[in-house]
Image (cartoon, rainbow, N blue to C red):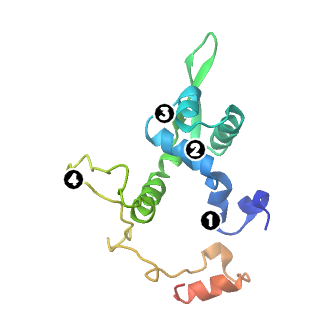
Amino acid sequence: MRWEELDQQSCSLARALSVIGDRWTLLVLRECFLGIRRFDGFEQRLGITRHVLADRLKKLVEAGLLSKEAYQQRPLREEYRLTAKGLDLYPVMLALANWGDRHMSGTEGPPLRHVHRGCGRQMHGVLVCSECGEALAPGAVRLEEAPGLEGQVLPAHWQQARGGEST
């Protein structure tokens, strides 16, 4: 499978990676969640080339994760704001940060703490079942064909996952 064809796969993860699957895109999104909105702010914070930054921002706007809004008319200057679709990536970003804190921090520990505004306590994101609230872990979820896929031949690795086996 070619990188350019990920958005055509019958796999939601592959389609998601077609939009956010490179390091610069995820770092641009991180900065958006930290409140950066303007091109020069992204450029300064990330140390990214203008060409690469412009390309990533354009992709995120085209995919509907960011919107461009004018903050100055003459000359026209625009800022980037997370859309509802972009905001829906927050749990993904929090999960990646949590994984990095656990496995990539080294002896000095995580560089930042995540503090829940509601209770004021340090926390880490936990993925839970939307129906019963139980924490989810590998092996606790099985895959089933969606109604639109019934009767289609699925890849062998999907067949195994449907059986509830974990890797």
Indicate the secondary structure of the residue bearing disc 1. helix
| Res. 65 mark | 2
Residue 18 as seen in the image, left or right of residue 98: right
At x 32%, y 74%, the residue is 134
**Which is closer to the viewer, label 2 or label 3?**
3
User: Outermost residue toward the front?
Assistant: 107
At x 39%, y 74%, the residue is 136
Q: Which of the two discs, 4 and 1, labels the residue nearer the N terminus?
A: 1
- Which residue corresponds to mark 1? 12
Indicate the secondary structure of the residue bearing disc 2. loop
Q: Which of the two discs, 2 and 3, labels the residue nearer the N terminus?
A: 3
Q: CA distance from mark 2 to mark 3?
A: 14 Å
Q: Amino acid at mark 4?
A: Arg
Residue 17, position as x, y percentages in the image: 64, 59
Q: Nearer the viewer, residue 138 or 103?
A: 103
70 is higher (above) or lower (below) than 12:
above
- Which residue corresponds to mark 4? 121
Question: Pointer 4 and pointer 2: residues touching (CB < 8 Å)?
Answer: no
Residue 67, position as x, y percentages in the image: 58, 35
Question: Pointer 1 and pointer 3: residues touching (CB < 8 Å)?
Answer: no
Q: Determine crowd level at label 2: few under 14, some 14-19, many 20+ residues with C-alpha closer than 10 A.
A: many
- Which residue corresponds to mark 3? 36
Q: Amino acid at mark 2?
A: Leu
Q: CA distance from mark 4 to mark 2?
A: 30 Å
| Res. 166 mark | none
At x 61%, y 88%, the residue is 160
